[in-house]
Amino acid sequence: MSKPKQIGLLVDASRAYGRGICRGVAQFAETRADWLILTHERPELEDLPRWLQKARLDGLIAYIPNQRMHRQITALGVPVVDVHGRCRSPRVPVIESDDAAIVRLAFAFFQQSGFRHLAYCGYPGVFFSDQREEAVRLEASSLERVHLYAPSARKRVGADLYQLEKGGGAHEPDLARWLHALPKPAAILTCNDIRGQQVINACREAGIRVPEEVAVLGVDNDELLCRLSRPTLSSIEPDVEQIGALAGRLIADQLDGQPPAPRHRVPPRQVVQRQSTDTVGTENPAVVRAARLIRERDYRGASVEQICEAAGLSRSTLDRLFHAHLGHSVAGEIARTRLQRSQNLLRHTGQSIAEIAQACGFPSATYFCRFFKRETAQTPNTYRKA
């Protein structure tokens, strides 16, 4: 029996993003009977752990947070894949979430909800946040003005993201001032879920209503963190399992003598909507009232006529207002709300397709399945398995 290949996995598994990468690596490793995965999951590392330096690795998948660790890792002389992206080298391939695709998905989601005032809030000086801000700047060139959070220069942070996140957002008077100054209603994309939670907390302290005045969308879809936020935090779900699986593939290719491309970007999967974006981005009282009625009654299968009657407006008038403020009809808003509700139930419950169809107001499971496939190009069961 040949000696197994020892593949190091140096990833921060304290976060959902890192745990997803580990799952993807594990899935790929299951196809390699001769691979032995050696893990080290502690965050906040400044140096390569000594036991990994002595482990006689055949390959390494790692967060590489600084140049010192980068030198230590490359000195091992084994195939390496970086799933962090801060320290770039032509000799080490990097896999990262596609920031441009994340921003496009977020802005399309906000615009579909009728928001005209879009914003981005990150950690200025932190590499991945700055990358996303640059993607926002590029995307903003085709939109109206996008508001960027920019604290005073003396308060810009450095590389110690963990310490910044632990400190929370309460110590940032600049953030409260920025939130007050935003035109309302506004929709904010944050650089990650922790920042999203901090923005929600800052809004609460400042007396700004979420989502009515400010809708907040994070990135990473850390399930526990998002559900512990009040209101619960909507988030963009990255395809971290794909990042992990691709990392495994690139290590295997290098072991087989195939040089990898230097940079790989993996697009996100979807927006996972929760309470922090459960609104429409308009101040028109008739549209807001009708949209709220749709959300309250979607489980009863409310029709366009019932919504118009409850709102006290004719269908032609309400459709005209919806098109003017949201870009789609009342029927389109009903369909969008039902789709989001059904996706949440498919992701987070064990309810049958028939039960979900009934919960979302569809006359039958067959009708629901046809609707879902038309809207997503997937069957409900395929979506649930993915």
Image (tube, rainbow, N blue to C red):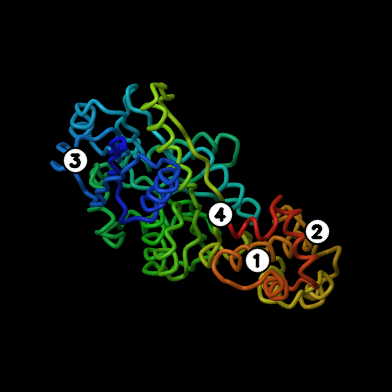
Between 224 and 135, the one lying in front of the other is 224
The tag earlier along the polypeptide, 3 or 1, is 3
Q: At 49% across and 56% down in the image, what residue appears? A: 235
The tag earlier along the polypeptide, 4 or 1, is 4
The residue carrying mark 4 is: 271
Q: In this view, which residue lies farthest toward the front?
A: 1
Label of residue 342 in the image: 1
Q: CA distance from mark 4 to mark 1?
A: 13 Å
Q: At 63% across and 67% down in the image, what residue appears? A: 341
Label of residue 33 in the image: none
Q: Quadrant of residue 84?
A: top left
Q: Is the residue under label 1 in contact with that under label 2 (CB below 8 Å)?
A: no
Q: At 37% across and 32% down in the image, what residue appears? A: 251
The residue carrying mark 3 is: 52
The tag earlier along the polypeptide, 2 or 3, is 3
The amino acid at mark 1 is Ser
Q: Is the residue under label 1 in contact with that under label 3 (CB below 8 Å)?
A: no
Label of residue 320 in the image: 2
